Amino acid sequence: MKKIDEARLKNIVGERNIKTDPCDLYVYGSDSSVHHALPWAVVRPQTTAQVQEIMRYANENIIPVIARGGGSGMCGQTVPIQGGIVLDMKGMNKILEINPQDVYCRVQPGVVDDDLNLALKPYGVFYPPTPASSRIATIGGEIANNASGVRSVKYGATRDAVLGMKVVMANGELVTLGSHTRVEASGYQIHKLMVGSEGTLGIVVEATLSFVPLPEFRCMGVANFDSLKDAGEAIGSIMASGAIPSMLELVDSVAIKAVNKTMNLGLKEVAAALIFEADGMVKEAVDYEINNMRTICERHNGQDIYSSYDPKEREKIFLGRKKLFPALSKYDDNLASTALADDMAVPYSKMAQMAEKIHEIADKNNIIMTAYGHCGSGCMHTKILMDTKRKDQWASAKKAISEVYDYVRSVNGTTSAEHGIGLSKAQAFKLEKSDSLTLLACIKKALDPNNILNPGKLMQAPENWVTATNLRYSVNC
Amino acid sequence: MKKIDEARLKNIVGERNIKTDPCDLYVYGSDSSVHHALPWAVVRPQTTAQVQEIMRYANENIIPVIARGGGSGMCGQTVPIQGGIVLDMKGMNKILEINPQDVYCRVQPGVVDDDLNLALKPYGVFYPPTPASSRIATIGGEIANNASGVRSVKYGATRDAVLGMKVVMANGELVTLGSHTRVEASGYQIHKLMVGSEGTLGIVVEATLSFVPLPEFRCMGVANFDSLKDAGEAIGSIMASGAIPSMLELVDSVAIKAVNKTMNLGLKEVAAALIFEADGMVKEAVDYEINNMRTICERHNGQDIYSSYDPKEREKIFLGRKKLFPALSKYDDNLASTALADDMAVPYSKMAQMAEKIHEIADKNNIIMTAYGHCGSGCMHTKILMDTKRKDQWASAKKAISEVYDYVRSVNGTTSAEHGIGLSKAQAFKLEKSDSLTLLACIKKALDPNNILNPGKLMQAPENWVTATNLRYSVNC
């Protein structure tokens, strides 16, 4: 382990804001992925100037720096695979400005998504890219991964909402990118490149974000399907019809069973269900969208179709989906839910086939996989339920994942819709982006010549994700 | 003038597709800006392989290559300031795929915007970023400049519609960027960086674009104002209200006079008028938007407020705005309309002040300037009407422009909303982006180490735009 100049770091951020205790280092060695690796120190800057000083120190001494928000990343983005400093950005969590006249807000990167939306609510607006982890996910982390969630189908992902930002570069320089205006054509829009770069190109210290009005009306519906194929085809038909759902979610039989088991919801255990929502300022327009989606579901053999404007009814419909992530961990007491191959995107017409493929591959490889997700924006989630203590299950998972991504590439899909690449998806990512890897490396080298910003991720990550780091499970792979 | 290896180029593209005749070179020496400079040759590739071969040749021999579409650029983006090869991309004008199921199309860069929309119409969809120059502007040029137009307020600019692309890099390598899916978080989204890079980072040879359904209902309205301030404040109020206009345009007294004079429209010659539109699938929702905008206009002393769903009435309302660009040339027989300081963007709350500032600066500098534009998306257009034969008028224009941009920067606006930087706006751009210029240069050098892709533009452009090239007017500045 390389020596960190603790005294110098303490001098920058103060004694309270640096941690080198083994317990702390252990905690900061993992996120919501399967990976684990120890940092050398955890540093929590309070100001932009401190971030600049830390970067100057790290750049001079070639020490990896890994910016971290809520730690809800699914694929090892903040796991310090080469050690170094974990930069805990949660200390910079001020909402700097809410400007309803100009329809933007300015925030520090450590602001938690739900806190931002709470602060925006009195203005009658909301920040829509919100992922499922919004209770802990920070705006900085969401920017690093181009996060999105259930409402991205209508309102777009993080990249669509970021108007500008301030970024500390690898050498400690502070740059201002983008603008405070809705449209901009002034030169290279590097802030759009920063979104999704997983902390490998710079440290975001401030972001200017757009927001949208809270709708007057929201209506949510649900339809059951006896076949995953029918449900998948309904999604394709809805999106090809020009519909504008504010939510279009798939949950499959595994997901339904999991939430029934954990929460006694008593949901009908069908092959698949679609949850759909429309919103707007005018009820007739919401009705139009909902009726269109109901009709398409019917045409694809949807059953028990039901929709409601009532907030309590909507909550009931969505409850299962909302609690799905923790529920999957309890599907089978012997099986853990692992975030692997968790968020590919495919063209709409391939949604049905993608869902079926997931189950086919799971069966073949003797593991359990779910098919669910924000399918209206092309995103298919899965989780792998497996006995993480068994080495052979990891081998099966690895094989299954490989097959999933082979399919994704064969239909012009992409490796990650909204969770990023990190360590877990590097192999699939490199295969998908094979002809532009040189270009990616070229940009990385130009902006971070000493390779200190979150090194060993994305195109730099090891081929074999199982052995890339220790796994945070008691197994030796 | 550097020697071009004509034989080699002919071998690549065929004799028909290379031009070195002085007349041809003269024509390709200008776009819709004030600038003029001669290329060494004009080459019209027909295939991606030909573009790759040309780039390999140019890179080996350090010859500038300037990709060009319709030549409707306003600020000298395609004027070959350092000579070299103008790559006329209009030979690659095939629509490769229209995929209504997956809601995207794939096109070559030379496809003209209107032609794409004509081809999309039978599918009930349209490509919305469309600028006013859509009769000649190509998709490649629109991508190079992040073009947008009247409907960007609701539907976004080019960057929002580009899902992916194939790009030939400076060294001739072909890379595939982005995806065919709605959301993507797979690594650096370099295609978003390419949009707006003005041909300085690569040559786009194919683009995957999203489209949206043609609305069932469109309603357009107009309101007259006795003061520019009232009109500007109405824009701010409309946008802050959460309204979703599909168009929100300002025209000022100069603009109204110009179209009245040229086309005898008989429009009331007020200080300013707002043209607003809403669209959608449900009439009640369109009514809601229109009524909201009408009410806000009234509140800001708008008069003669009128709106209509009738296509003929809508055409009548919009005719003046549509023909404004050519009409401005005829406002005064002694004055030419020049594209200078033509498309800044400012925060909504500064729209009124920006419009007034334009007139104040024009008066002070003894020139005529208009204030108009897609104000709903924050974009304020202007044109400078001046006697282009008089050297002192150029000096006045230069001073006025400088003052306009000083104001834009002072209110956190940006130099270009949708026309790009090129040569004319380089000075303002460099002042605005002063703290990120090193970063821009760094990216440029990484992707184009020999500086052959449209050199001398953006951050590389000369400080003084008046003397940067010859002007395409009979004046000696």
Image (cartoon, coloured by chain):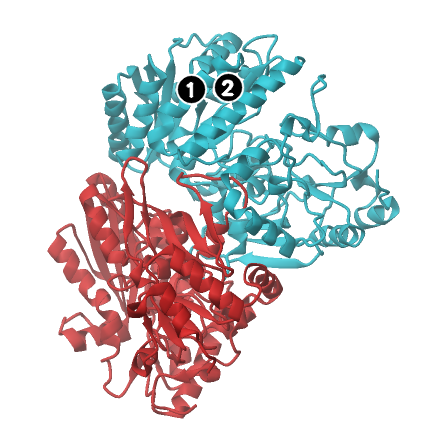
Chain colours: A cyan, B red
Residue drawn at point x = 41 percent, y = 62 percent: B417
- Left or right? Give the position of A40 relative to B66: right
Number of other residues with Cα within 10 Å of mark 2, as a class: few under 14, some 14 to 19, many 20 or more: many
The three-letter amino acid code for the residue at tag 1 is Val
Of helix, strand and loop, which one carries label 1?
A: strand
Give how far across and how far down residue B224 sits, in percent. Answer: 24, 64
Residue B406 in view (yes/no): no
Of helix, strand and loop, which one carries label 2?
A: helix
Q: Kindly identify which numbered label has been placed on residue B280.
A: none
Give how far across and how far down residue B340 sits, in percent. Answer: 39, 75
Q: Quadrant of residue A49?
A: bottom right
Q: Residue furthest right?
A: A7
Label 2 resides on the chain identified as: A
Residue B417 in view (yes/no): yes
Q: CA distance from mark 1 to mark 2?
A: 9 Å
Residue drawn at point x = 44 percent, y = 82 percent: B469
Give how far across and how far down residue A43 sits, in percent. Answer: 76, 41
- Left or right? Give the position of A94 relative to B266: right
Number of other residues with Cα within 10 Å of mark 1, as a class: few under 14, some 14 to 19, many 20 or more: many
Residue B191 lies, with reference to residue B10, above or below; the image says above
Q: Are marks 1 and 2 in contact (CB under 8 Å)?
A: yes
Q: Kindly identify which numbered label has been placed on residue A251.
A: 1
Count the numbered circles shown.
2
Please name whichever residue, B245 or A338, is drawn nearer the observer in this view of the structure: A338
Residue B136 lies, with reference to residue B423, above or below; the image says above
Label 1 resides on the chain identified as: A
Which residue position holds label 2? A324
